[in-house]
Image: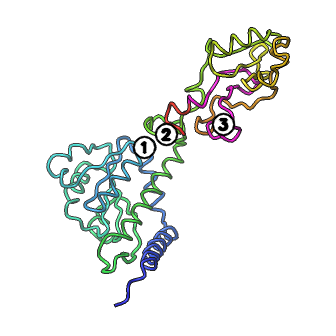
Amino acid sequence: MSQPDIKQIARDVLTLEADAIRQMSEDLSDSFSQAVSLLLNVQGRIIVSGMGKSGHIGRKFAATLASTGAPAYYVHPSEASHGDLGMIAKIDCVVLISNSGETKELADIMLHAKRFGIKVIGITRNHHSTLGQQSDIVLRLPDAAEACSIGMAPTTSTTCTLALTDALAITLMKIRGFDADNFRVLHPGGRLGAALVTASQIMHKGDLLPLLSPDAPMEAVLLEMTSKGFGVAAVADEGKLLGIITDGDLRRNMSALMTKTAGEVATPNPHTISPDSLASEALGLMNSYRITAFFVVDTDDTIQGLLTVHDCLRIGLG
């Protein structure tokens, strides 16, 4: 008996599911726009429910909505029948997911929604099904074969449901103008949160900054750099950055160092960043330029702060 072609099996699955998503994209109807409008204008929360594999996709959909500025949560249909219907209020909107549209466990949620006039968006392959008939808006999944060899395990259908709910979430996100600053507020932990921190949030400022006038003697430069401990100092005039002095500049001018002023030793036009630059971006530039710090300046080169590689590493970057 010949061995199966493992890569070909995988390609067949990926091709089948990709074709189904492509079909769904081409067949996208006005119902999608109607669903987006309903979700945008809901006064309460977006309640998502589904059973089995549809429930797994539903949980992910609710989590994506919540993390991108649309208050949402998942209600398990079986738990709903035992008291959790109380979580669904009249001002909410319900999204029910069922490939067949005949998932019995969703019946109580549908009845509850009808009783209290709660709008229902149904996601199903069969718009003639119970879910299709009871929904205010129906988002149809493509009538495509499942990718498994017996055509029964939820594969293509769950992939399409995932893609469709992602499309809903991202459309809502873009229409709301949800940006990186909003995202950072809801994702403060881990590398994701760290990657969205700006320079202004972690930079050193005020009395911590090593600042010198252009005519400062080198004795003052050495004292300032030593006391502040960053290995760099800014040469500034009325708060505007003129140049920087690094340990390398001191070594390059060692032969007559003490006879010079800060302005004579400083390197003019140094690399800088703006206060709203991402710390992750700054770290990447430090690596590219092989430097360990940036002075943070506004649009007219007024010094706002100092960001070092250690600040970036401290919040979990790198």
Is 131 left or right of 18, judged from the image as shown?
A: left
Q: Are marks 2 and 1 in contact (CB under 8 Å)?
A: yes
Q: Amino acid at mark 2?
A: Phe
The residue lying at 82 percent from left, 16 percent from top is 257
Q: Which residue is mark 3?
A: 286
Whole-Å distance between the Cαs marked 2 and 1?
Answer: 7 Å
Identify the residue at horizontal 26%, vertical 52% (top origin): 113
151 sits left or right of 294 in the view: left
Span colored in magenta: 283-311
Q: CA distance from mark 2 to mark 3?
A: 25 Å
Q: Which callout, 2 or 1, points at the residue further toward the start of the chain?
A: 1
Secondary element under disc 2, as helix, strand or loop, is helix
In space, the residues marked 3 and 1 are separated at their CA atoms by 31 Å
Identity, as a three-letter code, of the amino acid under mark 3? Met
Q: Relative to 174, say whether 110 is above or below.
A: below
Q: Which mark is residue 183?
A: 2
Question: Image quadrant of residue 305?
Answer: top right
Residue 121 x/y as whole percent: 35, 57
**Badge 1: residue crowd in 10 Å (few <14, some 14–19, many ≥20):** some
Crowd class of label 2 (few under 14; some 14 to 19; many from 20; radius 10 Å): some
The mark tally for this picture is 3
Amino acid type of the residue that numbered disc 1 sits on in the rendered structure: Ser
In this view, the residue in front, 16 or 306, is 306
Q: Earlier in the sequence, mark 3 or mark 1?
A: 1
Residue 255 drawn above or below residue 58: above
Q: Which residue is mark 1?
A: 67
For the point 67% across and 30% down, which residue is it? Answer: 274
**Badge 3 density bin: few <14, some 14–19, many ≥20, Cα 10 Å:** some
Viewer-nearest of discs 3 and 1: 3
Q: Quadrant of the C terminus?
A: top right
Q: Decide: marks 3, 1 in contact (CB < 8 A)?
A: no
